[in-house]
Amino acid sequence: MTETRVPRGATVRLGTVTGDLRAEPNSRIEVDGRLVVPGEVHFKGKSEVGGDLECRYFRAEDGTVRIGGGLSVQEDIHCEDAILEVDGELKARDVDVDRGLRVKGAIHGRTFDVGGFLEGGSTLEATRVSVGGLVRLSGKMIAQDVEAGGSIDIADVDLDTLEAGGLVHIGGGTVRQRIKVGGRFVSDAPTEFGALDAGGFAEFRGDGTGGSVKVGGFFTARGNLTFTTLDAGGFGTIEGNARGTDVKVGGRFRVGGSLELAGDLEVGGYISVAKEIGADRLELGGKLSARRAVIRTTAEVGGAVDIPGGLKAQRVTLGHRARAAGPLVGGTVELRDRAKADDLYGESVVLRERASARRVFATNVRLDDGADAEEITYVQSAEISPRARTASPPRKVDQLPPFPL
Amino acid sequence: MLGDREGRSGGVRRREVTDLYATVLEVVKRYHGAARITRVSYGAGMPVDRVRLLIRRLIDAGLLRSEDLDGRPVYDITARGQEFLDTYWKMRGYVEALDRSPEDRTFRRR
């Protein structure tokens, strides 16, 4: 195989060469139209090509290689301890660069494996992109899998998976399968995703639509969020409406609009919903505040609820020492030992030992020892322990007043 | 790089030693068992001698492991290393939360 050599420090003018091309440090190649190399191009040290370059293999080591035009490589690019800068478009099958890749035009390839940084001034299309450090792209990235150890900043995405250890900032787009961020994730515009797992901090500045959301640290959605399951262990805020299947909150969570769930709401920490909550089942160990809540099956409150418009469920249970501000409405409403509530409405209302309520409206009422109610209105039965307290005698009526909710 | 982000005053926060350990672990993790020291150096934005020292400490603590591949050492994260990262990022999330805007602080007081 023949080889064309460009000596150290030389400036030469080339068009099409036969065989390989080898350029020594500090060389510059002026291009007649387009430099075409049928074999391998090998740059050692800092070098520059003044125009478009087309070759079969591209190799560089120990320096920065700048291509003043486009770079088209039939097979692969391999740069060891080198930076590759391309002013035009870059096309290659596989790209492996140790230090950095900077391309002003569009980037096309199958795999990109970059140690330091990948910077693009336009779009990037690939199957897999893996960068140890930073990724910055001004245009859209279309790829299957993208991962970076450091940070990612991309204007628009159309991906299957996105994984980063550091910071991820996208202008919006679609990640069909999984977004996994160890550090911080920020999306500026509407985003669709299959699943989001953020260990640290995640923020949707536009609406978010996707599958499961798991946040260990801090989660914010500035708009509306649609999901299947939401598991927030740390702090969470959805400023718009939230719609999904199940929510599990271990930390603190705030919804600026309504929260509508087809499944369960489990709160171990604190959840605040500005408007309404709708869910199939509520299990509350911590605190909940909302304008009102309608639960289709059971609501078990172990902590405290502050719900001025009322909490309605087929069965409402206020646990030991639990607190409720606002009316509780149920088929059955039970206040366990030392629980305290405002007005209670139900088919059946039971106050266990030392539980207290303000007013009770029910078909059947039972107050155990030490239980306390200011006013009792019933239709069928009132089973009041002699050691229970009522401010006025229970009042039997033919029909109860309309229940709230 | 990790840690080179806005601090509470809006300026760039200087990387602390825990940030450096996390940076190295995150970069090593991306190579799925084949991380060479030069690649870690470029990815983490630190000189090789500094990275070598951090890697030694991480190996001693059981957060990284090393093996030879083609006569050269390569590194991989351990389960304990992943545990370190999970804890690190969760703590960073809490710190972010504590540095949030006044309206969020109002929420926290409720």
Image (spheres, grey):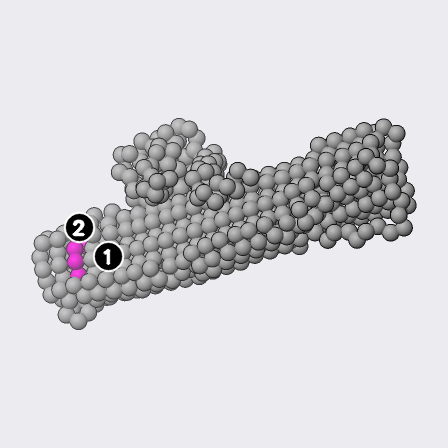
- Residue A33 drawn at (x, y percent): 17, 71
CA neighbours of label 2 inside 10 A, class few (<14), some (14 to 19), many (20+):
many
Residue A85 numbered tag? 1
User: Label 2: chain?
Assistant: A
Magenta residue check for A47:
yes
Q: Where is residue B3 shown, x and y percent of the image?
A: 36, 40
Q: Is residue B35 visible?
A: no
Query: To which residue does mark 2 refer?
Result: A45
Marked residue chain, label 1: A
* Mark 2 residue element: loop
- The residue at 68%/49% (across/down) is A309
Magenta-drawn stretch contains A337: no
Residue drawn where x is 37% and y is 51% of the image:
A152
In this rendering, position of residue A179 left or right of residue A293: left
Mark 1–mark 2 Cα distance, whole angstroms, equals: 13 Å
Residue A188 is left or right of residue A244, and the answer is: left
Which quadrant holds residue A373? top right
Q: Position of residue B95 (x, y in %)?
A: 44, 37
Identity, as a three-letter code, of the amino acid under mark 2: Gly
Frontmost residue, A83 versus A395: A395
